[in-house]
Amino acid sequence: QVQLVQSGGGLVQAGDSLRLSCIASGRAFSSYTTTWFRQAPGKDPQFVAARLSSGNSHYADSEKDRFTISRDNTKNTVTLQMDSLKPEDTAIYYCAAGRVNRFADSERPTSYNYWGQGSQVTVSA
């Protein structure tokens, strides 16, 4: 069993940066892939970035030059650093953890068993 608690988020202006953090409780955190999704009002969840248990990172094409996912297994923490934010980045962001081994699978919300509570990110123009 894994529990995920998120922190960070808020209201910023276009071009600003934000950092989201997700702390996991439970055992064997390093064996899980940890991923960030986001969901804008009226839209389906969208994959943002994943850090596989192998240590490899995988990004959505639209975010790979602006967002950075990092992970500290000693602190059971995964972080999403978001730079050069745009109004279209506005959404609720969720961290997720699951036993995922492939990039393609990491993009699917159904691959994950454990979810954080969500963090609102609002970017004004």
Image (cartoon, rainbow, N blue to C red):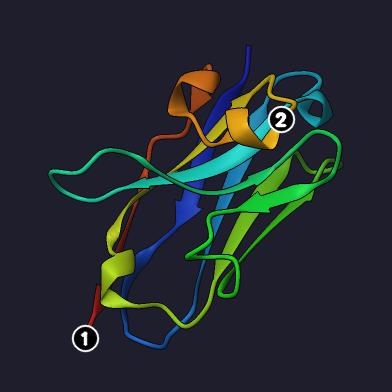
Residue 15, located in which quarter of the rendered image? Answer: bottom left
Q: Amino acid at mark 2?
A: Arg
The residue labelled by disc 1 is 125
- Screen quadrant of the N terminus: top right
Q: Residue furthest top?
A: 1
Q: Is residue 88 left or right of residue 41?
A: right
**Element under disc 2:** loop
Q: Is residue 27 above or below residue 84?
A: above
Residue placed at 54% from the left, 21% from the top? 111
- Local crowd at mark 1 within 10 Å, few (<14), some, or many (≥20)? few
Residue 114: percent from the left, percent from the top? 53, 22
Residue 53: percent from the left, percent from the top? 80, 33
Residue 99, located in which quarter of the rendered image? Answer: top right
Q: Is residue 56 left or right of residue 95?
A: right
Q: Is residue 88 above or below residue 39?
A: below
- Local crowd at mark 2 within 10 Å, few (<14), some, or many (≥20)? some
Q: Residue furthest left?
A: 42
Residue placed at 65% from the left, 32% from the top? 24
Name the one closer to the observer, 65 or 37. 65
Name the one closer to the observer, 43 or 119. 43
Front of the two marks 1 and 2: 2
The residue labelled by disc 2 is 102
Which of the marked residues, 1 or 2, is nearer the chain's N terminus? Answer: 2
Residue 86: percent from the left, percent from the top? 34, 78
Q: Is residue 122 left or right of residue 27?
A: left
Q: Is residue 124 above or below residue 54?
A: below
How far, Cα to Cα, is label 1 from label 2? 36 Å
Q: Amino acid at mark 1?
A: Ala
